[in-house]
Image (cartoon, rainbow, N blue to C red):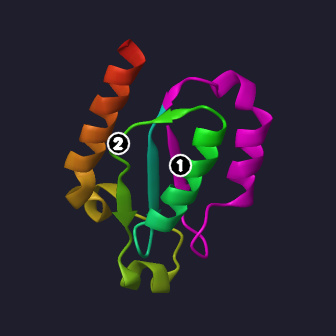
Amino acid sequence: MFVTPQYNWGYPAALKNAIDHLYREWADKPAVIVSYGGHGGGKCGAQLREVLAGLKLRTVATCPELTLPRTLIEANTGEIDAIEVFATHVDTVREALAELATALAA
């Protein structure tokens, strides 16, 4: 499972470094991408899906994109009440995890 913020429409360099470092261990394994950001992280998720496909990881169809409210980003407190902020995304995350569990069992 990859959980990543979207920075400037992409994923962080530290995540790419970690992926490159461990690519042999992840070959032919299923994965789910969960992205988050002010716009949900869809562009980040799309880029990451291409990278993972190149490394032969099999991403599940559902890739949750968690949207942070603009007011929370602008407040810049460094604190997030995840239960409150991401409550509307619970069903999508559950769906993605169910798909991942099915792929792992296969």
Dot 2 crowding, Cα within 10 Å, few <14, some 14–19, many 20+ = few
Q: Amino acid at mark 1?
A: Arg
Residue 101: x and y, percent?
A: 34, 23
Up-down relation of residue 43 to residue 38 (above or below): above
Q: Callout 1 environment at 10 Å: few (<14), some (14 to 19), or many (20+)?
A: many
Find out whether residue 18 is within the magenta segment: yes
Left or right? Give the position of 99 relative to 76: left
Residue 67 is situated, as x and y percent measured from the top left of the image, at 36, 68
Horizontal relation, residue 40 to residue 57: left or right: left
The residue drawn where x is 41% and y is 78% is: 72
Foreground of the two, 5 or 106: 106
Q: Position of residue 5 (x, y in %)?
A: 54, 61
In the image, residue 53 above or below residue 14: above
Q: Out of 40 and 76, give the one closest to the viewer.
A: 40
Q: Quadrant of residue 44?
A: bottom right
Q: Is residue 37 left or right of residue 7?
A: left
**Residue linked to disc 1:** 49
Name the one closer to the observer, 43 or 95. 43
Tell me if I can see residue 81 in this picture: no
**Residue at (64% x, 26% y) in the render:** 26
Question: What span is in magenta?
Answer: 1-30
Residue with the mark numbered 2 = 61
